Image: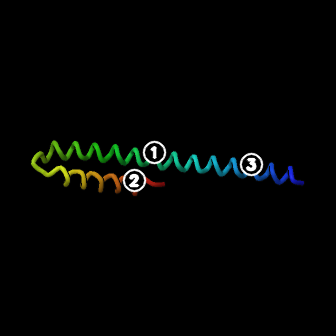
Amino acid sequence: MVSIIRRKFTAIELQLKQSTCEAVMILRSRFLDARHVAVVVTDLLRSWMPNCRVMNLHLVAQMTALFYVHFNCN
């Protein structure tokens, strides 16, 4: 009886670990995508508006990245 419960608990524990790992990898991927978008947008803004303050460019880039992540979530 105890061995059956241990096997079921072990199976549930393994499934939980796998699900957690998958969720972390998805979040990591979205974070890296957002960072890439922010870098690309900052570079584009620098070339289009060279006189604009760097802080403003970073703010716009970060907002763009947040929108990107928000609208690309499944």
Q: Report if the CB atoms under discs 2 and 3 are less than 8 Å apart.
A: no
Crowding at mark 1 (Cα within 10 Å: few <14, some 14-19, many 20+): few
Question: Which residue is farthest front?
Answer: 2
Q: Look at 19% across and 47% down and name the residue there.
A: 45
Q: Amino acid at mark 2?
A: Val
Find numbered disc 3 in the image and state the secondary structure of the residue it sits on. helix
Q: Are marks 2 and 1 in contact (CB under 8 Å)?
A: no
* Label 3 Cα crowd, 10 Å radius (few <14 / some 14-19 / many 20+): few
> Who's the residue at 18% across and 49% down the image?
54
Q: Residue 39, position in %: x, y?
A: 28, 44
Q: Earlier in the sequence, mark 2 or mark 1?
A: 1
Distance between the Cα atoms at labels 2 and 1? 10 Å
Instruction: Name the spot of residue 48 as percent of width and height, x first.
Output: 15, 45
From the viewer's perspective, tell me whether residue 63 is left or right of residue 29: left
Q: Secondary structure at mark 2?
A: helix
In the rendered image, the residue lying farthest to the right is 1
User: In which quadrant will I find the N terminus?
Assistant: bottom right
Pointer 2 residue: 69
Question: Which is nearer the N-term, disc 3 or disc 1?
Answer: 3
Circle 2 Cα neighbour tier, 10 Å, few/some/many (<14 / 14–19 / ≥20): some
Image position of 40 (left or right of 32): left
Distance of label 2 from label 3 (alpha carbons): 33 Å
Inter-mark Cα distance, 3 to 1: 27 Å
The residue pinned by badge 3 equals 11
Mark 2, mark 3: which one is toward the viewer? 3
**Mark 1 = which residue?**
29
